[in-house]
Amino acid sequence: MADGYAPRILKVDLTTREVEALDTEDYKDWGGGVGMGAKLFWDLVEDKTLTDAFDPRNVVSIGGGAFAGTPVPSAARSAVAGLGAFGYPVNWFTTSNFGGRFSAMLKLAGWQMVTVVGKADSPVWIDIRDDKVEIRDAAESGDGLWGLDAHETQKAIYEIHGADGTWRSTGASRDSGRTTQHPAVLTIGLAGENMTRIASLIHDGGSGAGQGGFGGVFGSKNLKAISVIGTGSIEVADAAMVLDARLWAADQYGYQVDGLKSFAISNPCQVFSGMPSASTGFGSPARPEGCMNCHKSCHGVRAASGLGNGSHCYDTQIWQVPEKTATGAVTGETQGRLADLMQALSINALALDTAGFWLGKLNEKGLVGTGKLVDTDIFEKYTFGTYEWAEEMLHRMAEKREVGELLAEGPARAAEKIGRLEEDVKSGDLPLQEWGYPHHYDGRTEVAWGLGSLLSSRDINAHDFNWICMWTVTLHTLYGLPMPVEAEEMANIIAKKTPPYNDPMIIDMSDEGMYSESMAKLVSWHTAYYMYYKNSMGLCDWAYADFVNPYGENLEGLTGIAEPKYVEGVTGRVEPLEDGIKRGTRIWNLMRALYILEGRHRDQEVYGDYMYEVPSMPVPGYMLMSTPQCVPVFENGEWSYKMVAGRMCDRQKTEDWKSIYYEFEGWDPASGWPRRSTLEGMDMGFVADELEAAGKLGA
Amino acid sequence: MADIEKKEATGSGVSRREFITGVGGVGVGAVLGGALLKGILLPDEVYAIPASEGYLLVDTKKCATCASCMLACSTAHYGKASLSLSRIQVMNDPLGLYPNDVAQNQCRQCPYPACVDACPTGANHADPETGVRMVDEAKCIGCERCVQACPFTPSRMQWNHEDKHAQKCDLCKDTPYWNEEGGPEGKQICMQVCPHNAISFTKDVPVQTDAGYDVNLRKDDAWGQFGFSTEDDGMTLSGAQGATYGGH
Amino acid sequence: MAIEALTQEDAQRFARTVDSAQAFVATIMSPSMGARAAQLTSVEMVNGFLQAYTIDDFKSVGLRLDIHYVDFGFLAQWLDEVIGDAGLAAEIRALHETGEAFGLLVHKVKEVLEERLVHYRVALGEEQAEEQLAESTV
């Protein structure tokens, strides 16, 4: 029966320059994306103690899930999985994610995933045209892509394809397949070619896999780009059901342009029902841009050139504070142009953000300048906070030139090199919350985000509870506006939608709740949900999970109802949400096993010191991420929303909570390693065997 | 030979307009076969192709290039999702600039359908009841004359390379995989699925220019509230539109 | 707030830019990137940082706003301990202690700050007193 999957997985060995088709059937249990990527890594990497992302034995897999390229709304995300160069102190197995068209186009070409092993002996790019795959010369001697920025590379590939918006054939006969579309390209710019640890993978104008450091991994393999054009089709189990599900979801829960409903504050509080916005235009006339089969359209395409076309979100926000400080104003001109430049060079936005922040602090201490601890002339030659400073810094990082050579290592390694790591992380001048990742959301207040990241290998960047439990509550509180739902109702709605636990206490983020077993359930459920439905099946973080929705009956969102509909329509599988959670838990355990073989132990799962030392509120003399976050709490026998800013994590209580969590997951609390019984219960005896052989099975 | 309907002239007293719009209850879209019109006097036999009773209109300044319409079109007609098999083709240059980066290429249901005229077997025909120009796949011999005949680029007649027949937009008259009535009296899946109402439907024959089919659909809903231009040129911003720096 | 007998010396001190070690720390909250600390080093900068959004701004549903947040209790403390303008600090503290929501207070705080900034300018001889007082009450 058709099930939404493409039949083959493309394996490209860059060392031997051989391509091989693996059978998707062997990997379907893992959903797609991250799940398949983890299993492919497991299968193809013999020595799983490998922790050098730049080693040719690193296996990087890219692709989406069963939903990509079907009418399922907001479901065509592409995942990247493999050892990531950014992680500190270890290049753990990690993941990244990007939007746009890539995973859908890959499936239309007949490939569910593309997995890259080895290293080419000279720059190459992979040209996929339906079932024809060619490893092409990317150097000057060939197609001349190496050395181009990420946008120029894509333009060059479009030209090679003759993509001009008219019909063109992908083969010799009229039945070979034809398309009007531009190829979907995933590429790197200079920062990736030069193997920085801060490089991203870029697709189209501004979709990007920013975190993880995969741009440098491509560079280490001499891989410039993967391009795919697919003229085929994706068969689903029940097409009528899929269409009905799409229309039902979008019409009942999505925004209605001719009948808007919203909370008092709509953005970012509304998830599935969020609306497009001309804010993405930076004041230039614009249209919205949506990823494949999305019902929302978060991105934008502007009229003005070089203004972050297609860029959105983090990439367009990071230079606000420095610019405001330096010039008194935040301009769309600066923010948009910087976003564009970051994409062109393929640099993770957080790299510039953190570099600016941290160097700014060191500069105030007199530690930055020619001949000083951070030996650079950038502050002397350019005014910090201006576009020019940031532009120069980005170029230096991409080229590993001058101070860029230090910062290209990522903030943790850079700080370690100059002997500032411990002190600056402790004070929060360098707010690396976990694994060398800059602070994104604050684990002192928004507990589940922090803990989930700590147990994983990176900033989780999964907003499922963030949108509704933190943003919605905080914004409505700050502006004295009526809450969409009161705390108890929110807890009950979320309980209903989080099987198998169905425990309203999971969103209790009080001082007690943050260390409770309910919090363990929350982290477990959250991880499983986003690992399966989002990272593997392809649902988008900006549309799901949808718990509270202004269009929904009783303001309930579509999570819990929609996901099983999509799964059934596409794959034919009747899979209630709790079964999807089980799949997610399985993927999570496989990833956990990879971390453990790479050396993970509970003793390493410790936040950056500032999380325990510094309160999360602005206090004169402290310079830190100040977060006036309001969250649901259950105190004195009742629910309410409370501002928990000013909180720190208690070191011992966090350690005690970790034990509760490990036990909850069926892992040995002494080490954080899964037990054989847990793994066998998920049909993962093969994982238990390998952990046992390594002496790393939980007791 | 075109699938045509012979009509007896109704004699004097019938204006050309009435003839064109009202003969036999079917609007006549064109007069073919070399018959000459002299005022209101018509020859005894008139070869005519009825006009379509419906037309898709698009707004390329509203389109988000999400391809939802394309994937839904192919799914509704063939039970499989495909960009290549979609009868509406939306293209954009991913690195292009608004407003010139998008093309929404819907079939125009031409009053004079060159594709119908070109078909030697009558596979491509105007539906007798609704005038919708559509393909009877069983009769298609794969000559692709219809594809060549379409005056637009890219051709709105397409070769379905998987199922080996010509195809075109039928206003969802025949959608075996969608549980809704289509055709001019029913619904069109592309329009239903478009998140922003960037596709609309009309029964009136559009002005036969590009501008007749690519229209401003941004005035009568919340579009302006989102900060986008509601002007015809898509560029003029007023009031709060475009006022904020945001990026997100 | 009634204009005190603000000496030129006082005005110079209160209107100064402090160094970053003594900066007031505020927050930019953005749905796209979480929270970022903002260092505000003068009263003028604090005023410029605060945005007087209204419910209508939020109702304009397409606009994705960033929130520039200041804790007014801490602001009062900073104005006292670092800037030294006890009168201004007291006004801000009084507003903070009403317990009203941030979004409702921010307009009132801005009014107070703007008025005080005029006082500074007048005391520094940078403005004509009557003209500016008239403007500041608009």
Image (cartoon, rainbow, N blue to C red):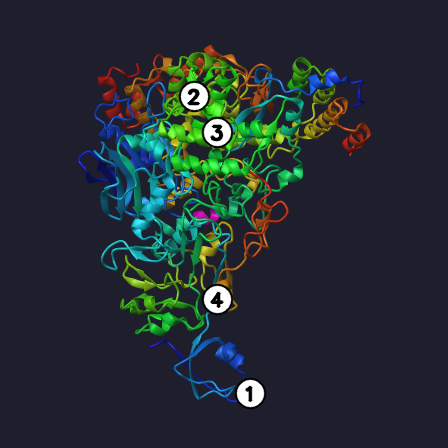
Q: Nearer the viewer, mark 2 or mark 1?
A: 2
Q: Residues at badges 2 and 3 in contact (C-beta under 8 Å)? A: no
| Residue for point 40% across, 58% down | B88
Amino acid type of disc 3? Trp
- Which secondary structure lies at badge 2? loop
In the picture provided, is A639 more to the left or to the right than A363? Answer: right
Amino acid type of disc 4? Thr
- Which secondary structure lies at badge 3? helix
Q: Quick one: label 2, few (<14), some, or many (20+) residues within 10 Å?
A: some
- Which secondary structure lies at badge 4? loop
Disc 2 and disc 1 on one polypeptide chain: no
Amino acid type of disc 2? Thr
In the picture provided, is A19 more to the left or to the right than A38? Answer: left
A366 or A353, which is in the foreground?
A: A366
**Cα distance, mark 4 to mark 2?**
61 Å
Q: What span is in magenta?
A: A245-249
Asked if the stretch drawn in magenta spans residue A247, the answer is yes
N-term mark: 1 or 4:
1
Q: Nearer the viewer, mark 1 or mark 3?
A: 3
Q: Nearer the viewer, mark 1 or mark 4?
A: 4
- Which secondary structure lies at badge 1? loop
Amino acid type of disc 1? Gly
Disc 3 and disc 4 on one polypeptide chain: no
Say the numbered circle drawn on residue B13.
1
Q: Nearer the viewer, mark 3 or mark 4?
A: 3
Q: Which residue is mark 4?
A: B209
In the rendered image, residue C40, in percent from the top left (x then y), is placed at: 60, 23
Quadrant where the image shows the C terminus of chain A: top left
Q: Residues at badges 4 and 2 in contact (C-beta under 8 Å)? A: no
In the rendered image, residue A257, in percent from the top left (x then y), is placed at: 55, 49
Q: Residue furthest top?
A: A652
Q: Which residue is mark 2?
A: A376
